[in-house]
Image (cartoon, coloured by chain):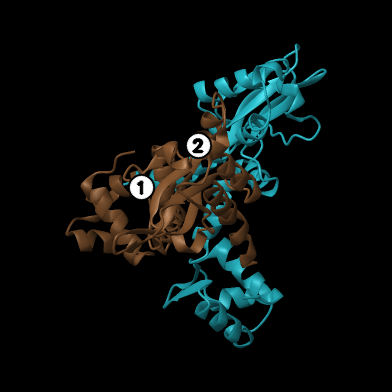
Chain colours: A brown, B cyan
Amino acid sequence: MELSERQKKIVEIVKENGPITGEHIADRLDLTRATLRPDLAILTMAGFLEARPRVGYFYTGKTGSELLTEKIKKFKVHEYQSVPIVVKENVSVYDAITTIFLEDVGTLFVVDDQAHLTGVLSRKDLLRASIGQKDLSAIPVHIIMTRMPNIAVCRKEDPLFEVAEILIDRQIDGVPVVKDKENGLEVVGRITKTTITKAFVELVTDTDQHF
Amino acid sequence: MELSERQKKIVEIVKENGPITGEHIADRLDLTRATLRPDLAILTMAGFLEARPRVGYFYTGKTGSELLTEKIKKFKVHEYQSVPIVVKENVSVYDAITTIFLEDVGTLFVVDDQAHLTGVLSRKDLLRASIGQKDLSAIPVHIIMTRMPNIAVCRKEDPLFEVAEILIDRQIDGVPVVKDKENGLEVVGRITKTTITKAFVELVTDTDQHF
């Protein structure tokens, strides 16, 4: 539903000052009570406001959604990131596959001799390489990895939901958490779809603990 | 913070009847105002209640979390599920890998001739099979798949967050949405970590649209 400018103002006033009577809302807008009556009726029917006799109007229903949005927007990458698993550029595809199983992760990050991020290897990249190739232990990962600058990265103070958006928009499973160094990026963590799924579960289970 | 039984009762009363005065809360509990004063002070300081002069006590701060929890608990599998990609049991591992790339999914479901669910194939299963095996086109998928009854399934009316919990607890990427048939389960959808990540993003972006 689209609210008129005046209706938005009313909601703002009630949000800030509620419970507040119709008279007081009218005063603040320099309008008569009668002028506001249809707006207040619409806002009440639509569930934006709730009216209680002899007390006034409340901003109720939507507060939950707003608080929720604000709460989720405050989740930071560093509160959720896991340990990154990195391999060197000259490691073989075979060894990378072994590492991905040993560490039980979906994404590996590739670094050069200065430990700077140069590439990303997903299970999908490794699966693609593993079919049709003769000798996986003869191919270094830098041949098949997705390489800088085509890699999505995030930093520890970024909001978690922005990284979730990147995962969806770019159709990838994981993003490295990086720290800026003089000549490149150091990998300090990882955020994956598993991280986001865990955060989603915590949204439900953590709030149960208030009681 | 742990609330006493009496404090929990007060919160419940304010939640149901707020705004409500201290006197009225005391009446409902058959106690004096003076007895309740310390409890009300604690609940107000802790942010469970808010007091407004000449109006009474509100249940405010935690409503957001509660509404959030309730909202997320209402998300149903069928509102979020994607189309399942299925293969027959005698399809080769090579063809399954081709399918996983063509369809761009992370999980395939395996069915028998009656189209009943018999197994699940993840990228991880296929990657494991693809290294060390000589001829992937000679191995049928039923050799390497995870098979019934060791498969986690969900149904379309299940809460989405319960499936998210299954994904985390069992460390899997996807779960089939099934329908009960006379002699087995029909696969009608899929829920994956991508589904949950999308739902997480929507929590933030959808609520923005109220204004």
* Whole-percent x, y for residue B15 in the image: 56, 63
| Quarter assignment of residue B171 | top right
* Whole-percent x, y for residue B207 in the image: 40, 47
Extreme-left residue of the structure: A30
Pointer 1: what residue? B208
| Quarter assignment of residue B189 | top right
* Whole-percent x, y for residue A133 in the image: 54, 27
| Quarter assignment of residue B99 | top right
CA neighbours of label 1 inside 10 A, class few (<14), some (14 to 19), many (20+): few
At x 29%, y 49%, the residue is: A37
At x 51%, y 59%, the residue is: A80
Please, what secondary structure does the residue beneath circle 2 have?
Answer: loop
Q: CA distance from mark 1 to mark 2?
A: 48 Å
Q: Are marks 1 and 2 in contact (CB under 8 Å)?
A: no
Pointer 2: what residue? A139
* Whole-percent x, y for residue B73 in the image: 60, 47
Q: Chain of mark 2?
A: A
Q: Nearer the viewer, residue A33 or A200?
A: A200
CA neighbours of label 2 inside 10 A, class few (<14), some (14 to 19), many (20+): some
Left or right side of B36 for A29: left
Left or right side of B62 for A161: left
At x 61%, y 18%, the residue is: B95
Q: Is residue B164 above or below residue B62?
A: above
Does the rendering let one see residue A48?
A: no
Left or right side of A123 for B162: right
Q: Nearer the viewer, residue A113 or A67?
A: A113
Q: Chain of mark 1?
A: B
Q: Is residue B190 above or below residue B22?
A: above
Which quarter of the figure is the N terminus of chain B placed in? Answer: bottom right
Q: Nearer the viewer, residue B118 or B55?
A: B118
Q: Amino acid at mark 1?
A: Asp
